[in-house]
Image: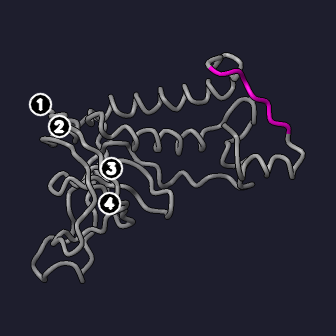
Amino acid sequence: EYRGVFEQYCIDHDIQIRRSCPYEHWQNGLVERANRTVKEMSRTLLHDSQLPLCFWPYAVNTAAYLNNRLATQSLSCTPYEKFYGASPDCSNLRLFGSVCYAHIDKKLRSTFAYTAKQCIFVGYCSQSSSYLVYDPTSRRVYSRRSVRFIQDWQSSCPAARLKSAPVSAAVPGDDNALAPVVDRSLVCDATLA
């Protein structure tokens, strides 16, 4: 598993790599437990938000993002704090699957057009300090910084408004006012009732 640049980094810094036997996952207990924690968190995020299973990559990324900002018993601080040497800013944390309104820039809309588009929050962007939002009308995920959230814990699930949830990248020249995050497609045939 540990080959290339990472293996060379370990050699350069006198870090010993222990390899486990193939198909003997019990030999690598700490990593397996960490993976299980992220998997269980992402499953909970998906079920709580009632989003279709095609959003599992966003749930896993969000679970890892949250897990790195939670204090652990073994470190007595957060993994983020241990890695960066500073406490994480948790003021940007939002409810996965909540309704949000992504701002549309003046340059991308007409004078009397809507100033925001209703979306669903599906995670945090890894390249910038922005949010990942899903637009049900275009069926695309976008990275937006100017977002207003509607986080009513008692309201009906925002995902129930979705008819289907295939996710794809925006086409250049599209009249959609939001810029796409990445050029990856997730095909999802799930339909919500």
Per the image, label 3 sits on a secondary structure element best described as strand
Task: State the residue at coordinates (57%, 30%).
Answer: 35
Magenta segment main secondary structure: loop
User: Relative to residue 55, is residue 125 depicted above or below?
Assistant: below
**Are the residues tagged 4 and 2 within 8 Å (C-beta)?**
no
Mark toward the viewer: 4 or 2: 4
**Are the residues tagged 2 and 1 within 8 Å (C-beta)?**
yes
Q: Which residue is mark 2?
A: 160
Q: CA distance from mark 3 to mark 2?
A: 14 Å
Left or right of 109 on screen, residue 169: right
Per the image, label 4 sits on a secondary structure element best described as strand
Q: Which residue is mark 4?
A: 142
The amino acid type found where label 1 is placed reads Ala
Task: State the residue at coordinates (54%, 25%).
Answer: 36
Which region shows up in magenta? 16-22
Res. 121 mark: 3
The colour mode here is one colour
The amino acid type found where label 3 is placed reads Phe
**Are the residues tagged 4 and 3 within 8 Å (C-beta)?**
no
Q: CA distance from mark 1 to mark 3?
A: 20 Å
Q: Which residue is mark 1?
A: 193
The amino acid type found where label 4 is placed reads Tyr
